[in-house]
Amino acid sequence: MMSRNGPGKRGVVTAASVLVAVLVIALLLVLPPIVRLENREVNAEELLAPAAVVSDSVPDVLVSEETFDLPGYSGTKVRRWQVGDRGVSLRIEVTKARNSFWGRKAWRNDDPANGYRGNFPHVTVARFSPAGADDAEKICVHGRYDECKISSFWLRFGQFLVLVSITDQSPEASHKDFAEGNLVTAVADYVRGKLNSQPD
């Protein structure tokens, strides 16, 4: 005899089983391309733009260069240049997260602007859209006369996070002649080109 309360436990179990089966099949169809995308055989150092990519956007010669691991982080590489004798440095940092989910999470939670606010009273953040980046923002740390003493560009490409910073290291230094737009575009194009060249 049919229960007055609906189809009964057997019907509920059957419906739940069908729903679980549909979800499992959907995951099996969608997951492989995502996994391929997130497990590229690319390391952070490969995405550090070389001098030839950035030199056209700086107003002076790159007189020194160093590449190093960032202490305390796994998979983070940094390349830094001294620009002429101006007291200005250019720095590119690349971090590889475990996958795109953790990349998105890190992009939101590890925003460099939060660190700058601990030392500087006037930090402004503006979103922008360089070609090929999934997320991007410009961070300006203001110095005297509202000049940016540190300009940072925080970019995400899937599981990869890229930070480009131009820093005035002395009070007299100025990076106002940097072609920042060209620099960020060149770095973004380089990173996206490297990622797109990898086989699926």
Image: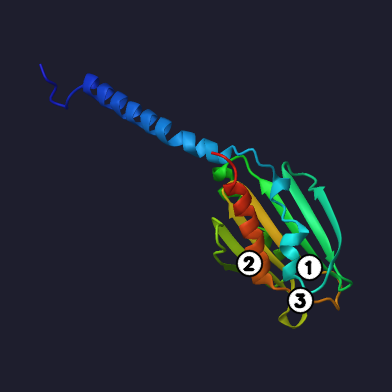
Q: Residue 170 at what x, y percent from top left? A: 87, 73
Query: What residue would you read off at disc 3?
Result: 143
Q: How packed is label 3: few (under 14 Cα within 10 Å), some, or many (20 or more)?
A: some
Residues under labels 2 and 1: Cα distance? 14 Å
- Where 182 falls versus 134 (above or below)? below
Decide if residue 112 is in sight here: yes
Considering only order in the chain, which callout, 3 or 2, is on the residue closer to the N terminus? 2
Decide if residue 109 is in sight here: no
Which label belongs to residue 167?
1
Q: Residue 1 at what x, y percent from top left? A: 10, 16
Considering only order in the chain, which callout, 1 or 2, is on the residue closer to the N terminus? 2
SS at badge 2: strand
Is residue 4 left or right of 167 when viewed as pictured? left
Residues under labels 2 and 3: Cα distance? 16 Å
SS at badge 1: strand
- Where 71 falls versus 123 (above or below)? above
Query: What residue would you read off at disc 2?
Result: 138
* Callout 2–callout 3 Cβ contact below 8 Å: no
Q: Residue sitting at 80 percent across and 77 percent down?
A: 174
Task: State which quadrant residue 53 falls in.
Answer: bottom right
Residues under labels 1 and 3: Cα distance? 11 Å
The disc labelled 1 sits on which kind of residue?
Thr
